Image: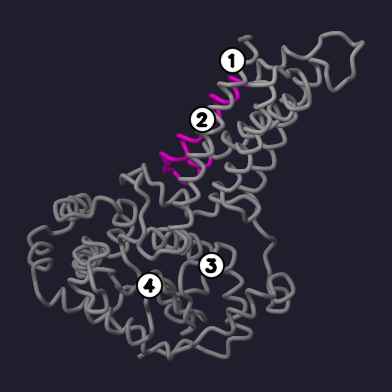
């Protein structure tokens, strides 16, 4: 067996491995998008959080999940490696395709690694595994360029120069397109007409959502931030163990940081049967206790700091961790312990849950934007579109209890 055939066969095995890993990535992406309360098996807590990475907007490219891109690239790579692995054909178009695919995949992997490190500040073990497969694929495939002729007497596509140029162009193009996609933000819109022209389907679906009186989903002493007289009030029913809620937490935090016309009200809706009568089982077994701990922090005027700490540590919300967060924030631990064990605290969380059930909530996060119910988190730029539509087309105004 020639060294070239051996390299092609190694590339073939790696491509099959890439298909397998990409399939798992796609499965987790679909589960996170469609199954309320699902958490990826590779989410370990802290910075190792596949849920945050895969459910973020960086989990897709051109609105196609990363798992699909991986499946397509590695499947084509399998077909391109077969001629060299079993038919003894090397230095031709199939090798050129293989080099382009491996190089392009490396470019996208570099972008994803950068996003995890510098934007999301969380890593996905599945993504890192896929990156490792891609690096191994590239290292295996690039030396196939030596199978191309060094002589200029052959056709250009069969020259060694063509193989190396293909590799450089593929890496550069993939990296550039991935980076542009990662940093791309649609131009701001200022009128409802602009929203309806740019995203007609979103405008139609948003304005068609059911609306309830704002007073029915909020309360005077609920945790809130933003101007009390803001023209738009967002009431968020959330679960501290819910991965999609963590994404909404980051996007809403960014929204309030740059806009003064929004008020955010937080209500609890743990997907845990111990305090949620609408849940047949404890989907998130630590969610009720975490909600109660947040209420205890609210009593000491530290709700939002504690709220942020809970979302940043979703996989470590057991009782000892809740006390650790309280100590780190300087709360009165004796008062915190008394509050956490008080039946009144559980009762308050249950009041939030009952208000959510009465408003038709079945999953988290559920948002009420000036009373208009939105099931699930929005893409980041859609929040701005919703605010414009609400103020111009909504026909509702914040109504306080």
Label 1 or label 2, whichever comes before in sequence order:
1
User: Given this view, does label 1 or label 4 mark the residue nearer the observer?
Assistant: 1
Q: Which mark is residue 6?
A: 1
Which element type, helix, strand or loop, lies under badge 4?
A: loop
Q: Within 10 angstroms of label 1, few (less than 14), some, or many (20 or more) residues?
A: some
Q: Quadrant of the C terminus?
A: bottom left
Magenta stretch containing residue 256, yes or no? no
Residues tagged 1 and 3 counted as in contact (Cβ below 8 A)? no
Residue that lies at the very extreme toward the front in this rendered image: 87
Q: Where is residue 353 in the image (x, y as percent from the top left)?
A: 27, 79
Which element type, helix, strand or loop, lies under badge 2?
A: helix
Label 4 or label 3, whichever comes before in sequence order:
3
Q: Is residue 63 above or below residue 392?
A: above
Label 4 or label 2, whichever comes before in sequence order:
2
x 43%, y 51%: residue: 52
As measured in the structure, the alpha-carbon distance from the residue carrying label 4 to the one carrying label 2 is: 36 Å
| Residue at image mark 4 | 363
Q: Residue 360 carries which label?
A: none
| Residue at image mark 3 | 259
Q: Within 10 angstroms of label 4, few (less than 14), some, or many (20 or more) residues?
A: many
Q: Is the magenta stretch mostly helix, strand or loop?
A: helix
Magenta stretch in the rendered image: 115-141
User: Given this view, does label 4 or label 2 mark the residue nearer the observer?
Assistant: 2
Q: Is residue 158 above or below residue 103?
A: above
| Residue at image mark 2 | 133
As measured in the structure, the alpha-carbon distance from the residue carrying label 1 to the one carrying label 4 is: 52 Å
Horizontal side, residue 383 vs residue 353: left or right = right
Which element type, helix, strand or loop, lies under badge 3?
A: loop
As measured in the structure, the alpha-carbon distance from the residue carrying label 4 to the one carrying label 3 is: 27 Å
Q: Quadrant of the N terminus?
A: top right
Which element type, helix, strand or loop, lies under badge 1?
A: helix
Depth order, front residue of 356/232: 356
């Amino acid at each position: 067996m020639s060294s070239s055939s051996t390299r092609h066969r190694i590339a073939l095995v790696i491509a099959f491995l890439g298909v397998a890993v990409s399939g798992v990535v796609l499965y987790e992406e679909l589960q996170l998008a469609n199954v309320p309360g699902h958490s990826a098996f590779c989410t370990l807590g802290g910075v190792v959080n596949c849920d945050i990475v895969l459910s973020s907007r960086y989990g897709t490219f051109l609105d196609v999940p990363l798992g699909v891109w991986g499946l397509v690239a590695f499947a084509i790579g399998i077909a391109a490696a077969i001629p060299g692995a079993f038919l003894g054909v090397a230095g031709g178009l199939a090798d050129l395709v293989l080099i382009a695919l491996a190089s392009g995949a490396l470019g996208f992997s570099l972008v994803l690694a950068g996003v995890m490190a510098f934007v999301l500040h969380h890593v996905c073990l599945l993504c890192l595994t896929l990156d490792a497969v891609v690096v191994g694929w590239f290292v295996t495939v690039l030396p196939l360029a030596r199978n191309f002729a060094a002589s200029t007497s052959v056709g250009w596509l069969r020259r060694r120069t063509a193989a190396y140029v293909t590799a450089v162009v593929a890496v550069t193009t993939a990296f550039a397109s991935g980076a542009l996609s990662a940093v791309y933000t649609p131009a701001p819109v200022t009128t409802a007409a602009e929203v309806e022209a740019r995203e007609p389907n979103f405008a139609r679906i948003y304005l068609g959502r059911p609306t309830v009186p704002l007073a029915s989903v909020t309360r005077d002493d609920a945790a809130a931030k933003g101007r009390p007289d803001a023209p738009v009030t967002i009431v968020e029913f959330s679960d501290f163990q819910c991965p999609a809620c963590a994404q909404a937490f980051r996007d809403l935090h960014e929204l309030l940081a740059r806009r003064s016309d929004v008020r955010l009200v937080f209500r609890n809706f743990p997907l845990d049967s111990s305090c949620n009568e609408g849940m047949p089982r404890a989907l998130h077994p630590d969610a009720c206790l975490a909600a109660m701990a947040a209420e205890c922090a609210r009593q000491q005027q530290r709700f939002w700091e504690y709220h942020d700490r809970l979302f940043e540590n979703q996989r470590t919300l057991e009782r000892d961790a809740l006390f650790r967060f309280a100590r780190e924030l300087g709360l009165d631990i004796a008062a915190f312990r008394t509050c956490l064990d008080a039946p009144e605290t559980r009762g308050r969380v249950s009041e939030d849950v009952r208000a959510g059930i009465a408003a038709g909530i079945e999953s988290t996060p559920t948002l009420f934007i000036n009373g208009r119910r939105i099931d699930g988190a929005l893409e980041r730029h859609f929040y701005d579109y919703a605010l414009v539509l609400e103020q111009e087309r909504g026909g509702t105004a914040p109504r306080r209890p």
